[in-house]
Amino acid sequence: MFDYPVEITKESNGTYTVGFPDIPEAHTLGDTRDEALMHAVEALETALSFYIDEGKPLPKSSAKRNSAVVGPSLIGTMKLGIYQAMRDGKVRKTDLARRLKCHLMQIDRLLDLTHSSRIEQLEAAYAALGLRVNVVLEAAE
C-alpha cells in the first residue's frame, strides 16, 4: 500500500546509497546493499513523517511490478493508513479524538511514525473511521 520504488547505487567507496524517486526527502546509505535497504525503511518513515506533520498528501507511489521497493514497518503502514483515511474522509484530528473519546495528544501519537502505538489503539482508530484492518501475507521477493 505504501511501497515506494528505490534507486540503489554502489558508490566508488564501496558503500550503497538508496534514494526514493517519489520522495526526494528520503535517502540513506549503508556499508552493504542489505544494510542500506534496512536503513531505507527508517529514512522512508522519517520523510513521510514530514508530510504528516505538515498536513500534506502522501506521495503516490510509482512502483511497477518487479521493481525494487521499500515500505514502512507494519505499525508505520497502519499509521499511514489512518492518516490517509482521515485525509480522504476530511476527518480532522479533533474529530477523531472526539470519536475515540481521547485527547488530541493521543491522536498525535497515533500518527507519529516514531511512536510505538499498540495495535488495539490503531484498530480502534480504523473502526472510528469506519474501516477495519485486514492483513494479507505475500511471498517475500
Image (tube, rainbow, N blue to C red):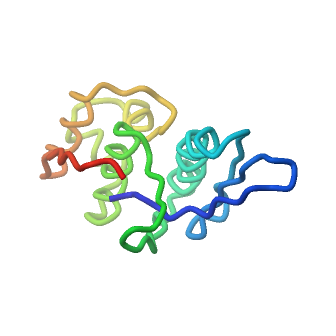
| 55 with respect to 121 (left or right) | right
Q: Is residue 102 above or below residue 49?
A: above
Q: Nearest the camera: 23 or 31?
A: 31
**Point 72% across, 50% down: residue:** 16
> In terms of depth relative to the viewer, which is nearer, 34 or 79?
34
- Residue 88: name its quadrant: bottom left
Quadrant containing the N terminus in the rendered view: bottom left
The image quadrant of residue 104 is top left
Q: Relative to 104, does residue 15 appear above or below in the rendering?
A: below
Residue 6 location, x and y as percent?
56, 62
Residue 131 on image: x %, y %: 14, 51
| Residue 131 appears left or right of 75 | left
> Does residue 88 appear left or right of residue 66 in this picture?
left
Residue found at x 64% / y 59%:
8
Query: x, y (%) of residue 80?
Result: 38, 50
Q: Where, by quadrant of the figure, is residue 86 drawn?
A: bottom left
Query: For the view shown, which residue lies furthest in the right direction?
Result: 13
The residue positioned 14% from the left and 43% from the top of the image is 127
Q: Position of residue 102 (x, y in %)?
A: 29, 30
Q: Is residue 89 above or below residue 116?
A: below
Number of marks in the rendered image? 0
Question: At x 77% / y 46%, what residue is drawn?
Answer: 15
